[in-house]
Image: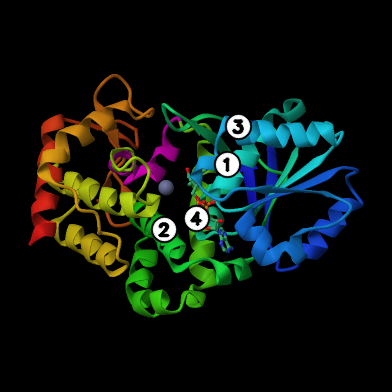
């Protein structure tokens, strides 16, 4: 598969391969200086496969807290100390945290150095490694500092999923369900059919499903690299989801927050007479079957959530913007735009209705 970057008339490849060791070795003949950067979980599981004596091996603490200016500085110091320059290569191996952090670091090191992503979590494989968004967090919020920066290549090895904890698989499933609702009714149907057996045995996640999600992501980012409109559809579930993450001080997982977020946003779509009640219930059932409706939000929290939605960086003015499903498999388009501003009252009503429904 290939990802086109139409603004710059360039493209990069996504390669499926389980020969990671050989891939890294091959790069040694192309680049004088190479760094492999991964978190300690990855080093623990795959140290033999990804480490080499003749390249710089960098180990990062796992977790969102590493997406910081401090860790970025740490990597930069190591690269400079080891005489890395503009012709060097950085290989990011890991989940979305490593991908975002290392991608950002590569984009500013010597004004941009060659980068390869080797995504290892389900989220990274189907979502974060593709599309060129890089970021770190700071005390004001998540992903506020970053760049758009494409890698030279993305290497996908689904064998990495074998060691990924079940909880992390569920997080990736939330994004996969999102893809089905925004773009693919047939994927939605497949997800209904495979669900139980999948959760019991995560190795049964099919290449076909993963490839379909990757295709949707590629198609969407190709048409709108800098997120001026079409790319907004990827934010379905995320306007409410990000507010929930902030409300829980980032202690709840992203997938759990966007799971609840998708349900509330589907309810909004239903209240404004787009999504049918029948399809709303189908979405609710699917999220439920993947255990993605499990937050205990109360009506007394609704005002606070609304405040956080207003702070979201994607909002113009002070009203809250959403990308909402018209039906399963497509997003509402109004006046040529894939996003829509929603009145506070409808947001509050939808949150309250969902809270009531979940209680019963
Ligand atoms: N850039 C984008 O477009 C984009 C899109 C979605 C999410 N993100 C970002 O991605 C991050 C979330 O990604 P994530 O869930 O992959 O987080 P993560 O990188 O923290 O990975 C989750 C956990 O799984 C472990 N792990 C990863 N691969 C493993 C493997 N193969 N075997 C065993 N353990 C493994 C990690 O060590 C970590 O503990 C967030 O920071 C989010 O903002 C970015
Ligand atoms: Zn997400």
At a point 50% along the width and 62% down the height, the residue shown is 212
Q: Is residue 347 visible?
A: no
Which is nearer the N-term, disc 3 or disc 1? 3
Say which of marks 4 and 3 sits in front. 3
Residue 106 rendering spot, x and y as whole percentages? 70, 35
In three-dimensional space, the C-alpha distance between marks 3 and 1, rounded to whole angstroms, equals 14 Å
Q: For the residue with label 4, is its CB less than 8 Å from the closest atom of ligand 1?
A: yes
Say which of marks 2 and 3 sits in front. 3
* Residue on which disc 3 sits: 70
Q: Is residue 335 magenta?
A: no
In three-dimensional space, the C-alpha distance between marks 4 and 3, rounded to whole angstroms, equals 24 Å
Q: Residues within 10 Å of mark 2 (few under 14, many from 20)?
A: many
Which is nearer the N-term, disc 1 or disc 2? 1
Q: Are marks 4 and 1 in contact (CB under 8 Å)?
A: no
Q: Secondary structure at mark 1?
A: helix
* Residue on which disc 1 sits: 100
Magenta-drawn stretch, dominant element (helix, strand or loop):
helix
In three-dimensional space, the C-alpha distance between marks 2 and 3, rounded to whole angstroms, equals 26 Å
* Residue on which disc 2 sits: 171
Which is nearer the N-term, disc 4 or disc 2? 4
Q: For the residue with label 1, is its CB less than 8 Å from the closest atom of ligand 1?
A: yes
Q: Secondary structure at mark 4?
A: helix
At a point 27% along the width and 27% down the height, the residue shown is 310
* Residue on which disc 4 sits: 123
Q: Are marks 1 and 2 in contact (CB under 8 Å)?
A: no
């Amino acid at each position: 598969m290939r990802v086109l970057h139409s603004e710059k008339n360039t493209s990069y490849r996504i390669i499926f391969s389980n020969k990671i060791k050989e891939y890294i070795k091959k790069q040694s003949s192309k680049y004088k200086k190479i760094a492999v950067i991964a978190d300690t979980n990855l080093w623990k599981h795959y140290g033999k496969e990804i480490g080499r004596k003749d390249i710089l091996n960098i180990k990062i603490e796992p977790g969102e807290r590493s997406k910081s200016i401090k860790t970025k500085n740490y990597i930069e110091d190591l690269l400079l100390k080891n005489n890395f320059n503009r012709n060097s290569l950085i290989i990011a191996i890991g989940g979305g945290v490593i991908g975002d952090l290392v991608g950002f670091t590569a984009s500013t090191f010597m004004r941009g150095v060659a980068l390869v992503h080797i995504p290892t979590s389900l989220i990274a494989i189907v979502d974060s490694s593709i599309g060129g968004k890089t970021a770190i967090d700071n005390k004001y919020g998540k992903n506020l500092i970053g760049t758009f920066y494409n890698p030279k290549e993305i290497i996908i090895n689904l064998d990495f999923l074998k060691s990924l904890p079940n909880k992390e698989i569920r997080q990736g499933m939330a994004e996969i369900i999102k893809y089905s609702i925004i773009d693919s009714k047939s994927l939605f149907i497949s997800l209904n059919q495979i669900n139980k057996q999948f959760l019991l045995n995560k190795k049964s996640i099919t290449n076909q499903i993963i490839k379909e999600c990757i295709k949707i992501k590629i198609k969407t980012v190709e048409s709108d690299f800098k997120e001026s409109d079409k790319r907004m559809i990827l934010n379905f579930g995320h306007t409410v989801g990000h507010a929930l993450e902030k409300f829980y001080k980032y202690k709840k997982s992203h997938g759990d927050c966007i799971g609840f977020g998708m349900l509330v946003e589907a309810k909004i779509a239903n209240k404004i007479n787009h999504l049918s009640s029948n399809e709303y219930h189908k979405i609710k059932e699917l999220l439920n079957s993947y255990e993605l409706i499990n937050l205990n939000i109360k009506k007394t929290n609704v005002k606070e959530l609304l405040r956080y939605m207003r702070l979201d960086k994607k909002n113009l003015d002070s009203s809250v913007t959403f990308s909402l499903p018209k039906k399963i498999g497509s997003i509402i388009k109004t006046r040529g735009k894939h996003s829509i501003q929603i009145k506070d009252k409808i947001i509050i009503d939808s949150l309250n209705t969902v809270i009531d429904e979940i209680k019963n």
